[in-house]
Image (cartoon, rainbow, N blue to C red):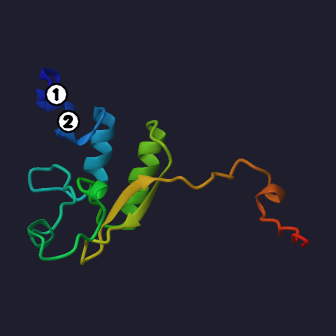
C-alpha cells in the first residue's frame, strides 16, 4: 500500500489490488457493498466444493473477486455513483453462485438511447425480404 493510504483520517481502507482507483470509489463501495466486520467490502469467491472439483463451477473464471451487494437496490445505487465518478455504464445482476441471492455489477453493453427523441427509440418492424 502507498504511504499516503495509511492515514486513518482519509476514510475507509480498501485493498489496492482489488482495482479501487481512488478514495471516492472506495467510499462508494463501503457505503453500498456487503462489508466485513473490519469494514472492508466482501468479494465473491468459489465454494470449497468448486475449488476441490467435486462440484461444477457455477460461473466462468472471470467472475471471481467481484464485490458483493446484498440487494439490487444497493448495487444500482453504487452503479449510479460510480458512473458519476467516471466509470463506464454499469448494471446489476444476481450471482449464480449465491444461495441467498447477492448481486454484482458488470459493464452494461446495451445501447443507450435515452438521448434520442421518442420516435427514434421505438423499434421499427423490418421490411420482409422477398425471395
- Does label 2 or label 1 sit earlier along the sequence? 1
Residue pointed to by mark 1: 5
* Residue 79 appears in the figure: yes
Q: Are marks 2 and 1 in contact (CB under 8 Å)?
A: yes
* Residue 69 rendering spot, x and y as whole percentages: 30, 61
Quadrant that contains the N terminus? top left
x, y (%) of residue 116?
A: 75, 49
Report x, y in % for residue 113. 69, 52
Q: Quadrant of the C terminus?
A: bottom right
Residue, far right: 130
Q: Which mark is residue 13?
A: none
The crowd level at tag 2 (other Cα within 10 Å; few <14, some 14-19, many 20+) is few
- In which quarter of the view is residue 34 placed? bottom left
Q: Residue at x 33, y 36 (%)?
A: 24
Callout 2 secondary element: helix
Q: Which mark is residue 16?
A: 2
Amino acid at each position: 500500500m502507498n504511504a499516503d493510504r495509511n492515514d486513518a483520517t482519509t476514510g475507509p481502507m480498501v485493498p489496492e489490488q482489488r482495482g479501487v482507483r481512488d478514495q471516492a470509489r472506495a467510499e462508494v463501495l463501503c457505503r453500498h457493498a456487503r462489508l466485513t466486520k473490519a469494514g472492508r467490502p466482501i468479494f465473491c469467491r468459489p465454494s470449497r466444493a468448486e475449488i476441490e472439483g467435486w462440484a461444477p463451477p457455477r460461473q466462468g473464471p472471470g467472475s471471481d473477486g467481484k464485490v458483493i451487494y446484498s440487494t439490487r437496490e444497493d448495487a444500482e445505487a453504487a452503479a449510479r455513483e460510480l458512473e458519476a465518478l467516471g466509470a463506464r455504464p454499469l448494471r446489476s445482476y444476481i450471482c449464480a453462485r449465491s444461495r441467498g441471492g447477492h448481486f454484482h455489477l458488470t459493464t452494461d453493453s446495451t445501447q443507450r438511447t435515452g438521448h434520442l427523441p421518442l420516435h427514434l427509440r421505438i423499434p421499427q418492424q423490418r421490411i420482409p425480404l422477398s425471395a
